[in-house]
Amino acid sequence: MSIVGQTRQGDVLVLTINNPPVNAFSLGVPEGLRAGLDAAEQDQSVKAVVIIGGGRTFIAGADIKTFDMPRAQAPDLRGFIVRLDAFSKPTVAAIHGTALGGGLEVALACTYRVAVKDAMLGLPEVKLGVLPGAGGTQRLPRVVGAQKALEMMLSGNPVKASEAAGLGLIDEIVDGDLLAGAVKFAEAHADQRPLPRISEKAAEGSPEVFAAAREGIKKTHQGQLAPGLIIDLAEKATTIPFQEGWDAEASLFMQAKDSPQSRGLRHIFFAEREAGKIAGLGKDTPQSEIKAVGIIGAGTMGGGIAMNFLNAGLPVTIVETAQDALDRGLATIRKNYENTARKGRMTQDDVEKRMGLLTPTLDMADLKDADIIIEAVFENMDVKKDIFTKLDAIAKPGAILASNTSTLDVNEIASVTGRPESVIGLHFFSPANVMKLLEIVRADKTSASVLATSMALAKKIKKVGVVVGVCDGFVGNRMIHRYSDEARQLVEAGAAPQDVDAAMNGLGLPMGPFQMGDMAGLDIGYAIRQHQAKVAGQPKPDGWLDRIVEKGRKGQKTAAGIYDYGEDRKPRPNAEVAQLLSDYRAEQGITPREVSQEEAAKRLTYSLVNEGAKILEEGIAQRAGDIDVIYIYGYGFPAYRGGPMQYADEQGLKNVVADLEQYGQTPAPLLKQLAEQGGTFAGWDKEKARS
């Protein structure tokens, strides 16, 4: 079958794109469409052309894999649109599924657009750090006005065809068969002249619209290049002829595409998809069906985890040890749902349906029919082993036994059961009903089926699942512990906490290490340090963070931690903390020095990178992209930086090694090796390195 098929329906030539799975505008598509237009031009009996997508969609955009190809070898989307502009007969884009990015730009260059009512249309390029590069920034404002065009291009979110029709973006909604409706529309408009040309219109938009957009992206897209360029180009659509705007768009598209930000966003786009490819798992790996879920613990984590499954329509039995704790947990879940309903994101009926799927109990034996049981209790090995010993006796054969542990050894937890192959770690991130990341911890004896089922379940509850190995803290928390240690050392050396946080805010993180600590609760880390010291028979920890907690300053929950907090929950430096730090340094014999934000940003970011290199070499993570996905979805690392490992690649690993050594850190062997070889984390493959 040709990538673009040609068929006749009376006087109409139908060009059908057959480039599964999503009809991306890749090599062969522009050539096929151009050949179809040429055929229609030469055949006097053809009165109009319909362009339609075969399969489940119209054109879902350009093929991102071709972005880095030499221009002469890449699919020529702009060249095809120039051809479409010059075509002398009416063209009708028939849209079902999605018309995104280059797909919508093709549709905009057609003389007419028809669609089924549930089709989606959008220009999502900003999500990849680029901008519409084939006329989208010039045509869309001329159709829907600058304000709506900016809303669509800056959010990257599509609109339904039913809304698009009201905006003038769709000429007709087709009920019934799309192709038949499109051909009928084409026949009705075949002889109408002159042909409607979007490029001949002037876009509507006042200076205030663009000023407001530029102010808005300071909050929504701080530090990003592409959004500002999109606004500039949309403004040009209101002030200069189409051809000048078209030429400007081509130049600025290349500027955005060749930026580190776009490379970072494209890296994470592919890394998220690669994360689903697990060594030892194939498409034929058997999976068990999950129809009923059990959760042990109705606290913050347990309740949040439960909501994910309730949202997916799965019944949940939730267990607590005391009625008051169970009641509090249920009340919190209901409150969360009702808050969502108040915001108009679900109906009260939806709230009741979800709550109706939830069965509370004080008896663990009620979990006997669950297909998966997730333990979400306090981070204490003895407690968890006791629970898994009981579960081993209660759970039905084949049930998955999962721990939500964030740091503990899943192998040790599995060892108390007679079915270690059924045990896995499912590390949800707080708040569990909001955060997209799920670290899936494969223990030594976890079966392939349990792993495959867990990955599929992550997708069902709309999480980004990343498989990791067993070590203290797995990937995310192991790296964050090293990061936090470095942050504490920076403060001990003389930096103010707010300056350390500002350094990471400047890199694009919404929270620096101390802002994050206050939000999570300083008492959690305090309790872990105290427990670890006790187990190891070491003296009670007495660092400056421990002293802050001992003053009752536990973070946002007490309105006082490293910072003070008012009703607005914004962090404000505290004079008592500043004095405590000064006293601590004096007591330790430390002469404080000035620490630049550049030093703070490098030391903190490269501490993540250095630990990530060790994790890669140990095989705890399969690939550098997995680490980046974890840090973007679990820790707020800015997506346009591509994650810590991609960021290091962009800086040059030789530079990273030099900075680590300058600041007294020992580069990991893998990092040093790659730097010496001129390699990158993205290009490193452990199996190839072994051979």
Image (spheres, rainbow, N blue to C red):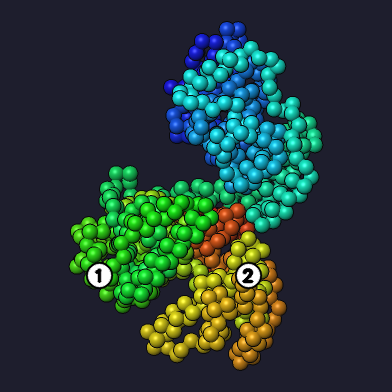
Q: Amino acid at mark 1?
A: Asp
- Mark 1 → mark 2, Cα distance in angstroms: 41 Å
| Marks 1 and 2 close (CB-CB < 8 Å) | no
- Is 143 rendered above or below residue 418? above
- Measured as percent of width and height from the top left, residue 339 is found at 50, 60
Q: Outermost residue, front direction?
A: 348
Q: Crowding near pointer 2: few (<14 within 10 Å), some, many (20+)?
A: few
Q: Residue at x 53, y 85 (%)?
A: 552
In the foreground, 7 or 576: 576
> Label 1's element?
loop
Q: Amino acid at mark 2?
A: Asp
- Measured as percent of width and height from the top left, residue 650 is found at 61, 55
Name the side, left or right, on which 240 lies relative to 472: right
Q: Residue at x 51, y 32 (%)?
A: 117
Q: Quick check: can you spot residue 267? A: yes
Q: Residue at x 40, y 71 (%)?
A: 328
Q: Quick check: can you spot residue 666? A: no
- Is 556 rendered above or below residue 260? below
- Is 231 rendered above or below residue 82? below
Q: Earlier in the sequence, mark 1 or mark 2?
A: 1
| Rendered image: mark on residue 568 | 2
Q: Quadrant of the N terminus?
A: top left
Reading the image, the residue beneath label 1 is 363
Count numbered badges in the picture: 2
> Label 2's element?
loop
Task: Name the quadrant containing residue 438.
Answer: bottom left
